[in-house]
Image (cartoon, rainbow, N blue to C red):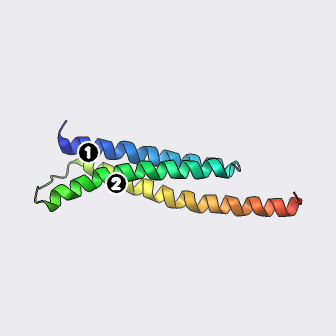
């Protein structure tokens, strides 16, 4: 496998795990387990960062004057990065909403 393809596979792998972890965080928050949701978000951000670092490697190559051909796998990898980033934002918003709902339910129930 060529170097660019290997970097793309690394990107796809890390950001895929990040996106899955963000989805898991939403599910944990929905169940009221906010500590675990926060842990999932932290783990997702760490995975996303690894994928971003791999992507940055390609940007550095281009900046050094090394022409990077854009194979379809790179387009897919960048699409996966954007998807993971969107899921991060959505997860953060949903978790905050679930926390507010949980607080309101606690107030209403008097617990």
**Mark 1 element type:** helix
Which one is in front, 93 or 75?
Answer: 93
Residue 91, how many percent across, how many down? 56, 57
Relative to residue 72, is residue 109 drawn left or right? Answer: right
Locate the C terminus by quadrant.
Answer: bottom right
Q: Position of residue 2 (x, y in %)?
A: 17, 39
Which is nearer the N-term, disc 2 or disc 1?
1
Question: Taking 88 as reference, is 110 left or right?
Answer: right
Where's residue 45, x and y in %? Answer: 46, 53
Q: Say which residue appears at 59% left-offset and 52% top-offset.
A: 38
Which dot marks residue 52? 2
Q: Nearer the viewer, residue 107 or 86?
A: 107
Crowdedness near tag 1: few (<14), some (14–19) or many (≥20) residues, C-alpha within 10 Å: many
Q: Secondary structure at mark 2?
A: helix
Q: Which residue is mark 1?
A: 7
Q: CA distance from mark 2 to mark 1?
A: 10 Å
Name the residue nearer the viewer: 15 or 43. 43
């Amino acid at each position: 496998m060529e170097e660019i393809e290997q970097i793309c596979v690394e990107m796809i792998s890390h950001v895929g795990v990040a996106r899955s972890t963000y989805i898991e965080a939403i599910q944990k928050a929905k169940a009221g387990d906010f500590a675990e949701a926060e842990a999932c978000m932290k783990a997702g951000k760490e995975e996303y960062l690894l994928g971003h670092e791999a992507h940055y490697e390609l940007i550095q190559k281009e900046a050094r004057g090394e022409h990077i051909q854009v194979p379809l796998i790179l387009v897919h990898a960048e699409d996966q990065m954007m998807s993971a980033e969107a899921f991060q934002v959505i997860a953060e918003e949903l978790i905050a909403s679930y926390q507010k709902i949980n607080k309101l339910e606690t107030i209403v129930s008097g617990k």
